[in-house]
Image: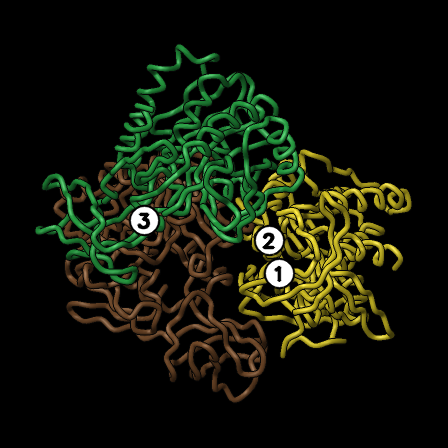
Chain colours: A green, B yellow, C brown
Amino acid sequence: MKFLFEILKQNSVSGDESKTSEFILKYIAQRKKRWKVLPEIYSGEDFHDCILLKFGEPRTAVFAHIDTIGFMSRYNNQLISIGGPEIIEGTSLVGEDSLGEISCKLAGDENNISHDFPRGIDPGTRLSFAQNIRIDEEFIQAAYLDNRLGVYSALELCENISDGWVVFTTYEEHGGGSMPFLLKFIQETAPVKQALISDITWITEGVQFHQGVVISIRDKFIPRKKFIDKIIRLAKESGIPFQLEVEEYGGSDGREVQFSPYAIDWCFIGAAEENVHSPDEKVSLSDFEAMLKIYPYLLERL
Amino acid sequence: MKFLFEILKQNSVSGDESKTSEFILKYIAQRKKRWKVLPEIYSGEDFHDCILLKFGEPRTAVFAHIDTIGFMSRYNNQLISIGGPEIIEGTSLVGEDSLGEISCKLAGDENNISHDFPRGIDPGTRLSFAQNIRIDEEFIQAAYLDNRLGVYSALELCENISDGWVVFTTYEEHGGGSMPFLLKFIQETAPVKQALISDITWITEGVQFHQGVVISIRDKFIPRKKFIDKIIRLAKESGIPFQLEVEEYGGSDGREVQFSPYAIDWCFIGAAEENVHSPDEKVSLSDFEAMLKIYPYLLERL
Amino acid sequence: MKFLFEILKQNSVSGDESKTSEFILKYIAQRKKRWKVLPEIYSGEDFHDCILLKFGEPRTAVFAHIDTIGFMSRYNNQLISIGGPEIIEGTSLVGEDSLGEISCKLAGDENNISHDFPRGIDPGTRLSFAQNIRIDEEFIQAAYLDNRLGVYSALELCENISDGWVVFTTYEEHGGGSMPFLLKFIQETAPVKQALISDITWITEGVQFHQGVVISIRDKFIPRKKFIDKIIRLAKESGIPFQLEVEEYGGSDGREVQFSPYAIDWCFIGAAEENVHSPDEKVSLSDFEAMLKIYPYLLERL
């Protein structure tokens, strides 16, 4: 879990993912010798701050976004949202601009967000929730579990995967935009027909803590029934605890698979959290464990 | 019209079009020997549940979506929409889940839709309007005229077409997503510069029953004037009754032609209906006849 | 400035850009012999009404949209919007339909726009704001400075550019749709990794007249920080007056670069205006001058 703590402390608000990207690349460089299969690694300026790992002969691609929601300073002491952060007065925010480190508190409401930093902040500066990781026997609670847990799960998958793409994407929280060029590269390099989205979803009246990893039948967008049925069948066989989600709203990198110029089936699979997009995102450890288990199981069989 | 009745009775709510796709493929297999030109047929898993027919040397592609709006069961007795169905209390719905056939009534309103089926329904189960086809001398009335009439019109076109693509698409009612890969395949196989959308539009203050097939100058999206002018000129020469539509809202597969990475002109052409997205969609038979006539006329001359 | 006056008098509401496209092509044909580098010119039906100029060996592409907002006649005396024009009762509108020239006044409000032309107007006819150009020592004021100034700036850039694409796009005001095929053509012909959007933005509490050309850190969409940082660094070195924009709303052709299947960085750079999308758009001449200066400076150094 050391690595999980480390990436939870990284800031990478959408559009500024370069440091987290480098951090993940370093981790990959250290670990890859112990992985079952040595992947081909694609990264660098041609891929903006995304990373693609190609293992063996891929049939399926797994996508985990490395960006987070956050805030951007505007003029005077104003802030505007990046992605859809919860606006809670008094929340601690951190960042850095040309004059140095920033630590301040959020003020105002959704229509008028501001900060209380004594000096002005350079316009365009990104601010993140101050990190505060809490773990007990049942839960992990922190900012940015969405999607640090998805990233962690994708990296754990790397340990044992034989065939598949593992892809770290950017901008997801703010409308996306890296998926189209990643999918093009994948399909022109070693094409797949299946995609899994390693990301965190929401606790709702039908999705509860400790009931297993969530397989999403739909959010705002609707994957093809044939593929979802296949995944549910495999999940049942696996014995790994899972629950089904049927939601009307929300989106993920899956949206961009759906609207891509490739006939690729997709499904969102991940643990559910409470206090979404707040500094207090909360995930059941047993649900997260089921998430960690189901990916290798599915990648082998899909 | 026998085939029209048959496809009106098929359920294929967005994301679950495989049975209707197979049904259309069977029809094509039976009929194609009598068609003027034998098409190349592209279908199967590489195309999800879409079907492409290539006749001769295409200059134009015709698109008809085979999915319908409907509902999906959520948790407890909740339903959520697929596409934008009319929410009318008491509407009869049908479907099937792991426990067998379902027949129930819709309850609640747009913010809280539910069903009255005595037992729970598997989450993620699709429900359709119970079909009730009514025909008299002037009108046809049924659920899913949008877009069974467009599909029927496209299949009628197959009888006499010399050159062109006829394409059956999926997901259209819920945001689309098959058009991008279909367009890519078309442009890499036998590219076109023109697209017609064979679909059903709305009766409004400017679009009336019995005034002919509708040529749409715009909906939410705006095709290029040069192409629309050309179609209107041909429609005038044809003597086939038509009317012009200018709407601010609504969309079709044309939207995805507009935003595709290909310079393809597009135009929506189809009959208009009352009681849109309800079990009582109503179309004038003479408007539908004009729709059936204008497609072969245009395909030959565009 | 003669050419600026001439293009300000051209009508080219989204979807009907062919005359303005021809006009710009004529201008290019006349001027290109005096340009430092003779570009390859791509235009005609394969590019709808867009124009691409390839100079030398491009590293960066500059995009300027040639369409404008406006209105379309619906049924009776109704109008609907194209793009998002300001609805100001009494505004003079001009256009042309099958019966001849039209000059009328706008009536009603956003929910119910109409015209007072004594006869009916053909459904689907485009109407533009009547042009009224006003210049004094500090300001230019007219309809459609957005984006005639961006087009003018892109054409001025052609005088001295050595390497780069200069591209004139269509439909931008109404959701876009030409960028995808233009980007595909560019990337398959002479690919770039950088894009600049030559367009006009808004005066706000943080963007003021006479403070220089605007470099946009974000609008509704967020370009990659690394690229924006590079541009700001170059702008500082240039000594050309500039100001930074951080907005939550608004979009441009940059949006379609972001969502394209190519890893291309983008940035919006242009003067700011008051009275956006009205007949009285107002731009500071010194801001516009800074816009004209920064493009050649950046194109050489990016």
Q: Residue at x 50, y 60 (%)?
A: C18
Q: Position of residue B266 (x, y in %)?
A: 61, 56
Mark toward the viewer: 2 or 1: 2
Labels 2 and 1 positioned on one and the same chain? yes
Residue tagged by mark 3? A82
Q: Position of residue C86 (x, y in %)?
A: 37, 73
Q: Which label number is shown at residue A275?
A: none
Give left or right: position of B101 versus A46. Answer: right
Position of residue B164 relative to residue A110, above or below, is above
Q: Which chain is disc 3 placed on? A: A
Within 10 angstroms of label 3, few (less than 14), some, or many (20 or more) residues? many
SS label for mark 3: strand
Residue tagged by mark 1? B114
Q: Residue at x 20, y 59 (%)?
A: C207
Give left or right: position of B133 versus A122. Answer: right
Q: Position of residue C230 (x, y in %)?
A: 22, 38
Q: Contact (CB < 8 A) between labels 2 and 1? A: yes
Q: Is residue C172 visible?
A: yes
State how far apart marks 3 and 2 are (Cα): 35 Å
SS label for mark 1: strand
Residue tagged by mark 2? B76
SS label for mark 2: loop
Q: Which chain is disc 1 placed on? A: B
Within 10 angstroms of label 2, few (less than 14), some, or many (20 or more) residues? some
Seen from the viewer's position, the closer of residues C147 and B243 is: B243
Q: Position of residue A89 (x, y in %)?
A: 23, 55
Position of residue A300 relative to residue C35, above or below, is above
User: Which quadrant: the C terminus of chain A?
Assistant: top right
Q: Which chain is disc 2 placed on? A: B
State how far apart marks 2 and 1 are (Cα): 9 Å
Seen from the viewer's position, the closer of residues B96 and B274 is: B96
